[in-house]
Image (cartoon, rainbow, N blue to C red):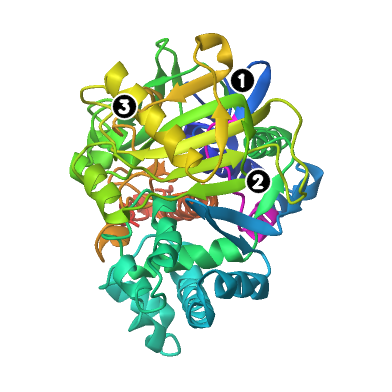
């Protein structure tokens, strides 16, 4: 019956996890996706005959994914091959370099050699604080439905009261880092974790220092690339009976008698359903991208609240002169100026640059000939406005190449369309992910209340749920996976509640009370 079917809009990580977990619970699930294959932002671009990760490149929180695969009757190792990275990332300020390692003692020693014993002690204190924040919020916030400050305190309980009173929500990350590190380069390094959720370290709360603990707990190198995770999650769903419809954009989410009733595809085909999980950005619903009837389910996002976008080069190219690791960051000399430019809607004159060398690992060996690269320069989320001009794009490219060359890295990206290099701009990201302006992380995490304002699993319309990196608990592959699991939990609870309260024939014509609209979460 159509009222028992569930339609998942979008085959990003949140949608794939939702679909797989629902199917494993015996639900009838259909995934409809506008693109030609799974992944959403976790996508690959094939250029020069090779697939290059064009989205997230860092795999963390492996135990979470092991839980998801186990819940679907299999194991992560049956679907993906990966190795733990001993070097988390290599950082450069001109000729100065600093590596962080999976072994915290090795990181501490490296920081001591780089900036002195005092900074090593500061790192030890910082690491302990990042862990404390993560441990305090993991269960009551990250793995629970969206909440408010009072309910969060209730969830944390009396034993968690000291942590609740010290969540570092009212001080910026940048200011807090100054209490651990005197060396501005180390402030810059650990402040970069704010960009993992598309935010500025000068505006986001110090609570987000917990991201450093997530990465320090383990980074894994996925054989073949991160996009293999999307393929694995799709296989997980298929094995449990999920139907996938690709090249099938949704024109409208149907709402009948005040609740979800299915979707209408761009082709005009109607798919009836009792529940809809939307893995698109919630702002797209609120902006009317899925029809007027569904618009009130969520709110549109003001452009000033958007997270960062990016200029992303995916390249099959050659490199020389700098000993690249898998993950490399080349920092600008003026971090405040960089983020001031982004906040004003401009590209930075001297940007920091992230280079993922996808064919490198912890060995010292360098690939021979061409290798796969993803190169990122942060950009403002202005993709629904005036596009960058060719001159602005070329200036950004030159500044990017100059930035890495100061550390000794020479990249030969080629100058022609046949060179194997593809650039994705905020305008392109807006086209791929409408109503975002190209923002890659949903709303920015600026201010103490940002995390509480994020869209939750439930919406204002019963039967419509949200999942993905733009929803609670936040941006990034693990958080998107958690959002998918939370959407499933809410949907199944609501379905069970509605089933219990559905009117039934009773002697004397008495019926049970009608189901009430579930509260927002």
- State which mark lies toward you, 1 or 2: 2
Tag 1 or tag 3, which sits nearer the N-term?
Answer: 1
- Residue 61: image quadrant is bottom right
**Image side of residue 69 versus residue 500, left or right:** right
Residue at the spot x=49%, y=43% of the render? 354
Whether tag 3 and tag 1 are in contact, CB under 8 A, the answer is no
Whether residue 58 appears in magenta in the rendering, the answer is yes
**Callout 2: few (<14), some (14-19), or many (20+) C-alpha neighbours within 10 Å?**
some
Q: What kind of element bears circle 3? A: loop
Residue denoted by label 1: 46
Whether residue 250 appears in magenta in the rendering, the answer is no
Residue 333 showing in the rendered view: yes
* Distance between the alpha carbons at the discs numbered 2 and 3: 48 Å
The boundaries of the magenta stretch are 53-68
Disc number at residue 290? Answer: 3
Tag 3 or tag 2, which sits nearer the N-term?
Answer: 3
**Image side of residue 340 versus residue 120, left or right:** left
Tag 2 or tag 1, which sits nearer the N-term?
Answer: 1
- Residue 263: image quadrant is top left
Q: Residue furthest right?
A: 78
- State which mark lies toward you, 2 or 3: 2
Residue denoted by label 2: 323
């Amino acid at each position: 019956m159509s009222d028992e079917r569930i339609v998942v809009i979008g085959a990003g990580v949140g949608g794939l996890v939702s679909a797989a977990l629902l199917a494993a619970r015996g639900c009838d699930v259909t995934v409809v996706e506008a693109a030609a294959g799974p992944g959403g932002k976790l996508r690959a671009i094939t250029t020069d005959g090779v697939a290059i990760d064009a989205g997230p490149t860092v795999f963390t929180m492996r135990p979470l994914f092991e839980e998801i695969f186990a819940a679907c009757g299999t194991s992560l190792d049956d679907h993906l091959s990966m190795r733990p990275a001993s070097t988390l990332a290599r950082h450069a300020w001109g000729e100065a370099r600093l590596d962080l390692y999976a072994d915290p003692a090795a990181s501490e020693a490296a920081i001591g050699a780089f900036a002195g014993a005092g900074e090593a002690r500061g790192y030890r204190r910082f690491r302990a604080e990042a862990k404390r924040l993560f441990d305090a919020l993991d269960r009551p916030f990250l793995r629970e439905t969206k909440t408010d400050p009072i309910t969060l305190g209730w969830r944390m309980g009396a034993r968690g009261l000291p942590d609740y009173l010290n969540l570092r929500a009212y001080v910026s990350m940048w200011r807090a880092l100054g209490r651990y590190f005197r060396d501005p380069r180390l402030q810059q390094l650990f402040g970069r974790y704010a960009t993992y959720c598309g935010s500025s370290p000068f505006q986001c709360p110090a609570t987000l220092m917990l991201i450093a603990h997530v990465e320090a707990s383990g980074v894994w190198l996925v054989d073949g690339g991160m996009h293999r995770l999307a393929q694995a999650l799709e296989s997980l769903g298929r094995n449990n009976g999920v139907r996938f419809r690709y090249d099938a954009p949704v024109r409208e989410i149907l709402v009948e008698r005040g609740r979800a009733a299915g979707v209408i595809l761009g082709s005009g085909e109607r798919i009836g359903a009792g529940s809809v999980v939307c893995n698109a950005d919630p702002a797209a619903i609120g902006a009317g991208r899925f029809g007027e009837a569904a618009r009130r389910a969520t709110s549109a996002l003001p452009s000033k609240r958007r997270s960062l976008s990016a200029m992303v080069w995916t390249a099959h190219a050659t490199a020389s002169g700098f000993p690249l690791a898998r993950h490399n960051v080349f920092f600008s000399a003026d971090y405040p100026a960089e983020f001031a430019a982004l906040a004003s809607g401009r590209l930075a004159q001297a940007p920091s640059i992230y280079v993922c060398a996808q064919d490198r690992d912890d060995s010292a060996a360098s690939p021979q000939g061409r290798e796969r690269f993803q190169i990122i320069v942060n950009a403002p989320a202005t993709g629904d406005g005036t596009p960058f001009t060719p001159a602005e794009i070329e200036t950004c490219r030159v500044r990017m190449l100059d930035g890495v060359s100061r550390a000794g890295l020479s990249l030969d990206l080629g100058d022609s369309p046949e060179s194997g290099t593809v650039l994705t701009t905020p305008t392109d990201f807006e086209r791929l992910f409408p109503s975002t302006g190209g923002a890659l992380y949903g709303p920015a995490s600026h201010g103490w209340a940002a995390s509480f304002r994020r869209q939750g699993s439930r919406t204002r319309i019963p039967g419509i749920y949200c999942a993905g990196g733009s929803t609670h608990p936040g941006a990034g592959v693990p958080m998107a996976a958690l959002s998918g699991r939370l959407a499933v939990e809410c949907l199944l609870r609501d379905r069970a509640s509605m089933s219990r309260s559905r009117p039934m024939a009773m002697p004397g014509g008495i019926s049970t009370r009608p189901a009430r609209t579930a509260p927002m979460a």
